[in-house]
Image (spheres, grey):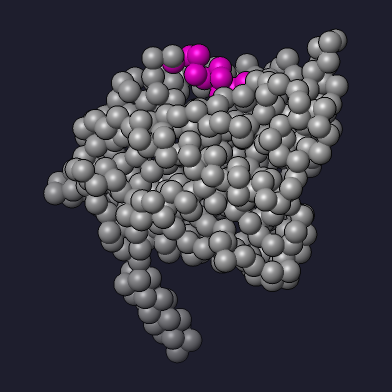
Amino acid sequence: MKKIVSAIAIFLLLALYLSFFPESARGVNRVRNNPVTERLQVAVFDIDITPPVGYKMPYGIVVNTWDLGLRAKGIVLSGTGEPIVLVSLDWLGIANDCHDEFRRSLARAAGTTPERVAVHVVHQHDAPYPDDYLNDNFALSVIHRLEMAVVKSLENTVPVTHVGLGEAQVYKVASNRRILGSDGKVKAMRWTACKDSALRAEPEGLIDPILSAVSFWNEDKPVAVLNFYATHPQSYYGTGVPSPDYPGIARFYRQLDMPDALQVYFTGAGANVGAGKYNDGSHENRGILARRVADGMKRAWENTNRSPVTISNIHWSVEPVSLPLDSVKAGKVLWERYRKGKKVDLQCLTVGDKARILFMPGELLVEYQIAARKMCPDLFLAMAAYGDLGFGYIPPAAAFPQGGYEADIAKVTPEAEKVLLNAISKLLNDKN
């Protein structure tokens, strides 16, 4: 009798699962198997991921919430083989096993593999960074709700007939945090909020001032715009109020201007870049910086060149690498993962012979983004960093003898630069 009851229970659970999830969530690639949909399509999703009052963030327990909360925004591209999922969250970080679980869950929802899922954070500081997601009910709920949002979005896919590419310079936001002395070593750090007028007077230093915008269109209607810009995304923090900070406000302004096209924001290789030259920490500067970034987003949109696209123009490539780690600084969790042969995926979305969009792990210093641009000077290039943040800061080799915060606490060794640049070169030159 017990066996019969168990069998019935299993049958009912299976029936419930099959009725609740569409084919894509059960690992069936409908685009690949259905000739009617053998074309490029996009689905969009957008959910609130603001933690509740009482939740412990790295820089304070949540005491209140703002009416402009934290979002997770992304797209699913279908028709290119297995679907591609791109998502950006207004969180401080997602790392190691938690990052793996996000990718597994979203892959399951979209009917694809984790290698074709890119999960990134914007890196605002008044935001969550779940250490132990298995014991974090809020983090688990976000994973579940994102999974459901992807499933739901696939019911509303629309054709992609064109891709738009646009760029614009952002003025008076980014500046390099590492101020070098005459001896070539870091003499001071110019943090994202800098009250020292002498440090603010220093030159901007090495930055990538370009904001890149990649848009997906259904004929003459934009469906989604992915924005990429390299700078630390906070003006001030430690308030106990979750905030998308100035990039999130800028994104909100653009969403108001373009209500029918989802606006997504990715932070580029901005680990050593912040607003310190233009921000003394005054709270009103948040709005000023937001308007400057929004202006860059607007001009990148206005500079967009739109061209037809088909599934043959879109290619996704992945380059798994093992980054050399400092056994002392890496910490037990990261060291054990990669001692056992765990690799991290570098990913690239290729748009024909026009564009490459790189999706990278860790807090990359801006030198990597500039190096990538030099590798493909005739192509449109965008980069999202802040993928798996288990690696923390990833400086170039030259930064280690210079010293400074990023180099002093880096979990990787100087040899990581060669590994990453070789992998980036392979991705940018992948012709498949």
At which x and y percent is residue 147?
A: 45, 60
Measuring from the top left, give residue 198's x and y in whole percent.
82, 27
Question: Could you tell whether 146 is left or right of 15 in the image?
Answer: right
Asked whether, in this view, residue 74 is left or right of residue 353, the answer is right
Residue 88: x and y in percent read: 51, 47
In the displayed structure, 251 sits above or below 320; it is below
Tell me: 428 left or right of 82. right
Quadrant of the rendered image containing residue 84: top left
Q: Is residue 401 above or below residue 8?
A: above
Magenta stretch: residue 372 in it? yes
Q: Is residue 338 above or below residue 5?
A: above
Tell me which residue sits at (67%, 24%) in the image. 204
Choose top left, top right, bottom left or bottom right for residue 137. bottom right
Query: Looking at the figure, which quarter contains the N terminus?
Result: bottom left
Viewer-proximal residue, 93 or 31? 93
The secondary structure making up most of the magenta span is helix
Indicate left or right for 1 with 70 as reference.
Answer: left
Q: Residue at x 52, y 19 (%)?
A: 372
Which of 1 and 317 lies nearest the eye of the viewer? 317
Magenta residues, start to end: 367-376
